[in-house]
Image: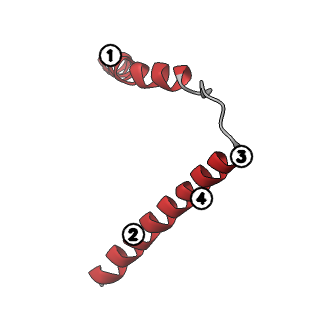
Amino acid sequence: MVEGRKRGRLRIWLSNKVQPFVDITRKYRQPKIKMTRIVRIALLLLRFYLILIIAILVFKFVTSIG
């Protein structure tokens, strides 16, 4: 019985901590400005570049450990 209460309290506490992030994400899901095709392509390329840099960092970290 006590385990169930603790789990319920934890779920409520986590829900209260995560809810502001959910609200912000919902509010800014749709952009308010119009983007041109070039801007969208540039942002997509920047996203790929960021993923590539992170992958290289992780690779270097893993290979330098051994």
Q: Which mark is residue 37?
A: 3
Q: Are marks 4 and 1 in contact (CB under 8 Å)?
A: no
- Asked whether, in this view, residue 15 is left or right of residue 37, the answer is left
Going by the numbered disc 3, the residue's amino acid type is Arg
Instruction: Please tell me which of labels 2 and 4 falls first in the chain.
Output: 4
Spatial distance from mark 3 to mark 1, Cα to Cα?
48 Å
Colour convention of the picture: secondary structure
Which of the two discs, 3 and 1, labels the residue nearer the N terminus? 1
Q: Amino acid at mark 4?
A: Leu
Q: Is residue 64 left or right of residue 53?
A: left
Q: Secondary structure at mark 4?
A: helix
Element marked by disc 1: helix
Q: Which x, y percent locates residue 19?
A: 42, 19
* Quadrant in which residue 20 is drawn: top left
Q: Nearer the viewer, mark 3 or mark 1?
A: 3
The quarter of the picture where the N terminus appears is top left
Label 2 to label 3, Cα distance in Å?
32 Å
Chain-order first, disc 4 or disc 3? 3
Marks 2 and 4, how far apart at CA: 20 Å
Compare marks 2 and 3 and give the one earlier in the sequence.
Answer: 3
Residue 1 seen in this snapshot: no
Nearer to us in this view, 30 or 16 = 30
Tell me which residue sits at (55%, 22%) in the image: 26
Q: Residues within 10 Å of mark 2 (few under 14, many from 20)?
A: few
Location of mark 2 (residue) = 58
Tell me if label 2 and label 4 are in contact, CB under 8 Å.
no
Q: Is residue 21 visible?
A: yes
| Within-10-Å neighbours for mark 3: few <14, some 14–19, many 20+ | few
Q: Which residue corresponds to mark 1?
A: 9
**Which numbered disc covers residue 45?**
4
Q: Label 1 vs label 2: CA separation?
A: 37 Å
